[in-house]
Image (spheres, rainbow, N blue to C red):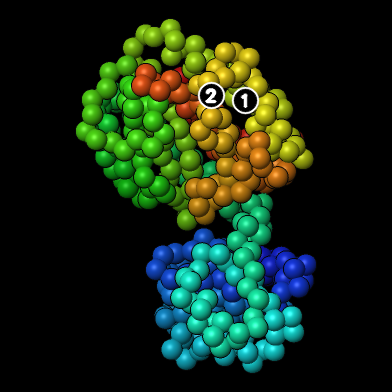
Amino acid sequence: MRHDDRIRRLRELMLDKRLDAVLIPSFDHSSPNLYYFTEYEDNGPNFHIITKDEERLITWDYLRAKKESQVKDCTSILDTKISDFLKRRGLKNKKIGIDGNIRYTFILQLKKILPDLILEDIRDSLMEIRSIKEDQEIEHIRNACLVSDRILREIKNGGLVNNDLSLKHEINRKIVNAGKEWSFDTLVAGDENSSNIHYFPKNQHFRKIVLLDFGVKSEQYTSDVSRTFLLERDSKAKKAMDTLINLHSRLDDILEPGINARDVAFFARKMLEKEGYEKTSYSNIHSLGHGVGLHEHEFPILSEKSTHTLEKNMVFTLEPAIYFPGEFGIRLEDTVLMKGIGIQRLSRFPFE
């Protein structure tokens, strides 16, 4: 079973790190790690505890958790204290792994009752477990990408609204009409604003160029796609666009299981520098790509500082870009799947 396999990998991590237990909490928002290991969605507070031979989900609505989660032992947060649960199990190594997204006040309370307890932040290790996607996870992401592609097609064929805020609302409306949610704040940036990766739509009109970046969530799993549309003839922008399209094609050629993410990022940066984009390359601002799944930013990270190796069934983005500050920016981003040989592009809407 899928749940049993995920818990098995978690216990292998415990053995490797000499942990007595793993604690995955969520407080006032849904936690990707808690959902991954329990398949229970709730804003919390929830506490998922795994020891070498026990697994328990402590939550407010434990009756719903018993019906909806994959955890057999669900109890009320009113009846179970985390510290008491851990204390009764006998902590041989006095060491537990915690998802780092945890409140400091909770840590203080835990340390007050168990002063010798060592807490190890294992959020990166949890994300590494999640980075290799199962078949069903891949299908959820594929479906999210299909919706993204359809929205891009409708937007382009219907004529682009030349106002950033109006176009953002149109994209979000299409996501909702498809029965989905947007997974992060939709970006629409036109003309000179497209060179600002942190731009927030401000009811600005554009006429030369527009950059779109949005994600669709399907069964909790997300797509992440960027497209740039050239609305007027501009040789400088067209050359940058063609360069990025060519780079994507070259990335198709080199990406194979076992390649180091940093080598891919180095290759992409050097190719843009060779074309004269050393000062305007994305690499001065952001990475070449990142994993996607239950969150829009996961492992692996494709940067020259990355320690990740790209493996079969990893899903990640490729988002090279060229930015001319104050003029325009072009970013072309696809969500891709690493196969046994090469990659498969899950987002397939044409770049131009």
Task: Note whether 124 is above or below 58 in the view shown.
Answer: above
Task: Name the residue located 58 percent from the left edge and 45 percent from the top edge.
Answer: 291
Badge 1 marks a residue whose secondary structure is helix
Q: Dot 1, how many residues are within 10 Å of its Cα: few (below 14), some (14-19), or many (20+)?
A: many
The quadrant where residue 267 appears: top right
Q: Position of residue 307 (x, y in %)?
A: 70, 45
- 81 or 217: which is nearer to us? 81
Q: From where the camera sits, is residue 279 visible?
A: yes
Which residue is depicted at the point 64% across and 52% down? 131
Residue 199 x/y as whole percent? 34, 35
Count of all numbered marks drawn on residues in the image: 2
Tell me which residue sits at (77%, 40%) in the image: 258
Q: Residues within 10 Å of mark 2 (few under 14, many from 20)?
A: many
> Residue 269 has which mark?
1
Query: Is 4 rendered above or below residue 246?
Result: below
In terms of depth relative to the viewer, which is nearer, 270 or 255?
270
**Residue at which label 2 appears:** 281
Q: Are marks 2 and 1 in contact (CB under 8 Å)?
A: yes
Q: What amino acid does circle 2 point to?
A: Ser
Nearer to the camera, 39 or 243: 243
In which quadrant of the rendered image does the N terminus lie? bottom right
Can residue 40 be seen by looking at this rendering? no
Q: Secondary structure at mark 2?
A: loop
> Does residue 61 sit above or below 104 in this rendering?
below
The amino acid on which the numbered mark 1 sits, given as a three-letter code, is Arg
Q: Is residue 102 left or right of residue 7?
A: left
Q: Is residue 155 left or right of residue 285?
A: left
Residue 341 point in image, percent of width and height: 74, 35
- At 21% from the left and 33% from the top, the residue drawn is 203
C-alpha distance separating marks 2 and 1? 7 Å
From the top left corner, tell me how far across and down residue 79 is, in percent: 47, 91
